[in-house]
Image (cartoon, grey):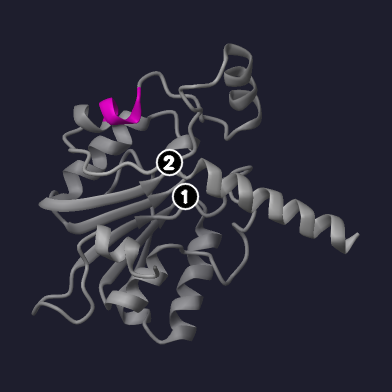
Amino acid sequence: MRFTLADNLDLRHGEGTVDPTVLVSCIINAPSIRMHALRPDVTGWPGLYLAQVTECDVVLTDVPVVGLQIALERAAADGFEARCRAVVADGAKLPFRESSFDALSHSDVLCCMPAKLSMLQACRRVACTDARMVFSVIAPAASLSASEHQAAIEFGPEFVDVDRDYALLLEQSGWRVQERIDVTAEIAQSIRTSLEGMKLSD
């Protein structure tokens, strides 16, 4: 369902007297993790989506400025540029005051950062007390053999390996896990479908 992400962040369309503010770390141009990363129609995910379906205010962060520029152009074209801001920032050193955001979301960011705990701590610092955070991350499955684990590290994002489980990192950074969803099967099917489509187009 299209509102699942917004529901998990506890954002509701048109509710409340003050629009919630959501921090979204885009990691738009991270190599090797998002085949669709430079498509203008998806740059800024999920921030632009959240701004559209919930009318929240969104702050996008990333290091490469080009992706943020594309996202702001898209927001302007879709008519909600007043609710969308962009800041060039390192996820582990977020330049915001404490308790600045009502919700946070980041997509495939932690697997591209060596300072995973520092980023989660930074997110906790800028989040309000009752804020929610939803994120996706690529990580080697615990069930992999030693050789499979090594292959996952070799062919995955640069910092895909994690010394400790993400649940432990979240606990150490002050977050409490409410739900954890494994979408390996869905991603694998999506990749297979993409590869089949490439073969058909050859």
Q: Position of residue 130 (x, y in %)?
A: 10, 52
Q: Quadrant of residue 188?
A: top right
Identify the amino acid type marked 1. Val
Q: Position of residue 48 (x, y in %)?
A: 41, 70
Report the residue marked by disc 2.
182
- Does residue 27 lie above or below 161 as drawn? below
- Magenta part of the protein: which range? 165-169
Q: Is any part of residue 97 visible from this angle?
A: no
Q: Is any part of residue 14 visible from this angle?
A: yes
Mark 2 element type: loop
Badge 2 crowding class, 10 Å Cα cut-off, few under 14, some 14 to 19, many 20 or more, is: few
**Which of pointers 1 and 2 indicates the residue nearer the eye?**
2
Membership of 144 in magenta stretch: no
Towards the viewer: 129 or 150: 150
- Does residue 48 lie above or below 135 as drawn? below
Asked if residue 173 lies left or right of residue 138, the reply is: left
Q: Quadrant of the C terminus?
A: bottom right
What residue is drawn where x is 55% and y is 61%? Answer: 66
Badge 1 crowding class, 10 Å Cα cut-off, few under 14, some 14 to 19, many 20 or more, is: some
Membership of 167 in magenta stretch: yes
* Residue positioned most to the right: 202
Q: Position of residue 3 (x, y in %)?
A: 33, 69
* Residue positioned most to the top: 146
Report the residue marked by disc 1.
63
Q: Which secondary structure type mostly characterizes the magenta part of the structure?
A: helix
Q: Quadrant of the N terminus?
A: bottom left
Asked if residue 59 lies left or right of residue 37, the reply is: left
What residue is drawn where x is 20% and y is 62%? Answer: 10
Q: Position of residue 4 (x, y in %)?
A: 33, 63
